[in-house]
Image (cartoon, rainbow, N blue to C red):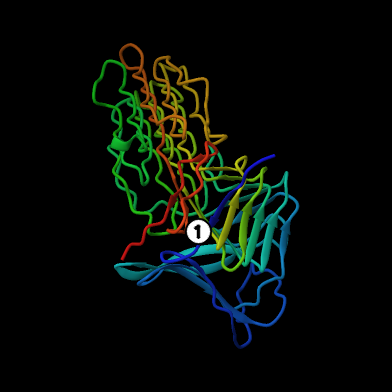
Amino acid sequence: MYRAWVVLLAGCGFQASAASDIAGPAPDAGPGTPAQDGPAVTTCWKIQDPDGARWSTCTSAALPASIDVARSVSIDTATGQASVAGFECVALTVDVRGGDFTTSPLCAVIAQSIKIEPNVTLSAHGSKPFALLAHSIEIEGVIDVASHVNGDRGPGTTQGCNELTPATQGGGGAGGTFDSPVDDKGGGAPGGDEGGAGKTGGKPAGTISTIFLRPGCDGGAGGVGDGAPPLAGGAAGGAIWIAADTGSLILGASAVINASGAGGLAGARANQGGSGGGSGGLIVLQAPSLTVDPMAKVFANGGGGGGGAQGDDPGDPGHEPIDPPDNPAGPNDTDGSGGIGYSIAHNSKPGKVGGGDGGGGGGGGGGAGVIRVVTRSATPPKSPNISPPAGSWAATP
């Protein structure tokens, strides 16, 4: 027996909104467009405040009747192509209102209804943020828009992040910071200093706005130590907008939505510092009726920092978030170990100082991502399986 969280979007504030008007023939949307059923219409998904729409995206193509994801599939949002035919995403533009009107790219899987079956994974990567847009959506499987150590980064680009203070010598890189200030313990953590060389670890940057549909911020690169090649910082978690405009959005007991940052790369040799972990990304859940089973996992945690090399002994790659509480045994307290990233159970931790004279410092843990429920009229669901805690999206005039 279980209790599900139910959020009804009503009253003033942000609401899901749809417009379905008979239109002329649908334009050719190009490669990656799912087969269409029924007459051409104009359908819009909007996030509104009393003064107008904050986000709005529309399609003039007829929506497929349904999309049932019954086998695992990977989608490249840059091209719209999918590893399984029929699950391609369509390039759309999001109009963004924030003082001035501007636009943001998007690649969306669209249909009248979308269901992700249990025991399958829908993953997305590429340069554009990702969306599932429908009249009703049910999620029982896994949606992976996270970034991974030595693997794909989540969907969207991280342009516009505030600049980290870079590591010097063999210091560790700082963790990435998104929307949570360091002072609130939700930001990225500093990198560890090179052994015997103070103030060489990287320092985290300030926060950035989430008015755009965009991922989080990467961690900082580890220092080059005694001439080792530079490392890339841990990649930030991606961005996803899941919106049902007129019906329900249901996250079942086996549902998982992961937009976490990647762990930082480890120093490989020559007292190289480890990279900072990427921050978590952005998850937006929107529907007139939202049901979240308490067992469902929704998380945008920070990646762990990579360990610094001690001489030519390499460090360990940063910890990769695997669930919302993400309770590893604890940070490794050896010389130059990387700090753990943010989760609902703990804040990000700094990297450890390198050993002796010259040992590479560990990368700092990545900061929290952002989870928004589009409503002002109800309290967002709270659960140890939602990390960071979800918030309602406040209007920005």
Q: Quadrant of the N terminus?
A: top right
Residue at image coords 29%, 26%: 169
Q: Is residue 258 above or below residue 49?
A: above
Give the number of callouts: 1
Q: Quadrant of the C terminus?
A: bottom left
Task: Indicate the position of residue 179 as horizontal and vertical percent values.
Answer: 36, 47
Query: Quick check: 251 left or right of 375?
Result: right
Q: Identify the residue shown where x is 56% and y is 35%.
A: 323
Q: Is residue 83 above or below residue 316?
A: below
Dot 1 corresponds to which residue? 128
Left or right of 74, for residue 153: left
Q: Amino acid at mark 1?
A: Lys
Relative vertical location of residue 106 with respect to residue 369 in this rendering, above or below: below
Q: Position of residue 222 (x, y in %)?
A: 37, 31
Residue 337 occupies quadrant: top left
Q: Is residue 134 left or right of residue 44?
A: right
In the rendered image, residue 250, in percent from the top left (x then y), is placed at: 63, 54
User: Where is 219 relative to 226, above or below?
Assistant: below
> Crowding near pointer 1: few (<14 within 10 Å), some, many (20+)?
many
Q: Which residue sits furthest right? A: 70
Q: Mark 1: which secondary structure? A: loop
Question: Percent from the top left, x then y, of residue 378?
Answer: 47, 55
Q: Is residue 124 left or right of residue 358?
A: right
